Image: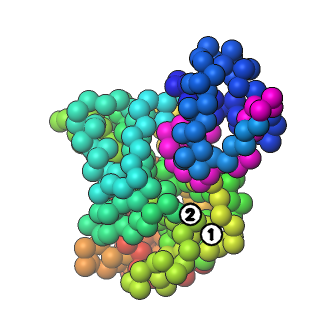
Amino acid sequence: MTTKFEILTQLKAHINDWISGEQLSEKLGVSRTAVSNHMRNLKAEGYDIMSATKKGYRLHYVPDILTPDELRSELDTKIFGCQEIFYFQEIGSTNLTAKEYALKGFSEGVLVIAECQTQGRGRRHRYWHSPPNSGIYLSMILRPSLPPNETSVITLMTAVALAEAILTEAEIMVRIKWPNDLLIGGKKLSGILTEINTFPDSVDFVIVGVGINVNTPPEIFSNEIKDIATSLFNETGRRMRRARLVAAFLSAFEKYYAIFQKRQFTTIINRWKSFSNIIGKVITVDILGRRYTGKVVAVDQDGTLVIEDHRDKRHRLISGDIIESNIN
Ligand code: BTN
């Protein structure tokens, strides 16, 4: 823990209250000059801190930033976000950078987070629009001790953790579209990109990348996506502190990760189904140009979608895009 982080923690614990420089310097074992220098740095990051002689310091406003100190001051996790947090104002893709760190041997729980991505990557080589200071672009390193064929649940579990975090923090219900898009009113709010590196019989690492449109004003969506994308701000009319949403997501993710490591996949799939409303619906799925239409009869333990076509033939679909459905 750095002194700056400890000062921030103290200020947040006394928000809208005065705390003296003397108290802080005694409590943290640093000089008054060091305290005042850290206060200057926090103000430069956007924290609104009043200072007055004889009274000390008073925090009024916490900015919407994703710095490691701000994230750590919100986190209640034991793995994710508790190792290194690599924070960038701008990056190509957090997934690519997280992959580089994983290849260098960084451990499970390491996060890569950015205020903006210039080459945000989506599923099937699509582009993920990542405008500055308004969305969450986050990737994390996982090193699960399960065989490669059991890792497909990770993506479903991530969608569930996101849906729960959004419900808690933004008080809005999202729908999960198989396999892993999060929608509100049929428009895309969030996407997940999971990438895996394996040894012959085991997993080396998994990168879970999450993009969420949080405070994004609708007018900054590009023409290609403005009719199919939405943001939490667009849906609720409220801006939120992204660090709180990241913390809620990581906390939910960690809870489901423990369930996943115990191989209790049914618990995860059942929760996923409660957000998806897909069973019994008639859908068309595109898999690299090949189309399947049928009624969804099951979602298996590993996330495989089972549909029954008009000849009662069953198809097991591992991945693809739902292009038509009567789900609302
Ligand atoms: C999709 O729905 O196609 C998946 C989108 C995933 C976007 C996130 S943003 C953070 C991470 N870094 C990337 O380059 N992509 C993922």
Q: Quadrant of residue 146?
A: top left
The C terminus - image quarter: bottom right
Horizontal and vertical percent position of residue 106: 31, 31
In this rendering, is residue 162 above or below 177?
above
- The residue located at (49%, 85%) in the rendering is 227
Residue range in magenta is 53-77
- The residue located at (54%, 69%) in the rendering is 216
Horizontal and vertical percent position of residue 170: 68, 59
In this rendering, is residue 327 above or below 60?
below
Looking at the rendered structure, the secondary structure element under dot 1 is: helix
Q: Amino acid at mark 2?
A: Val
- The residue located at (52%, 25%) in the rendering is 2
Horizontal and vertical percent position of residue 256: 54, 40
Left or right, 228 with reference to 244: left
Please report contact status of discs 2 and 1: CB closer than 8 Å, yes or no: yes
Mark yes or no: residue 266 visible: no
Left or right, 93 with reference to 306: left
Left or right, 227 with reference to 39: left
Q: Amino acid at mark 1?
A: Phe
Q: Residues within 10 Å of mark 2 (few under 14, many from 20)?
A: many
Looking at the rendered structure, the secondary structure element under dot 2 is: loop
Give the Cα separation between the discs numbered 2 and 1.
6 Å
Q: Residues within 10 Å of mark 1 (few under 14, many from 20)?
A: some
Q: Quadrant of residue 124?
A: bottom left
Picture disc at residue 214: 2
| Residue holding disc 1 | 233
Give the residue at the far front of this rendering: 53
Residue 60 among those drawn in magenta: yes
Mark yes or no: residue 133 visible: yes
Residue 201 among those drawn in magenta: no
- The residue located at (62%, 74%) in the rendering is 234
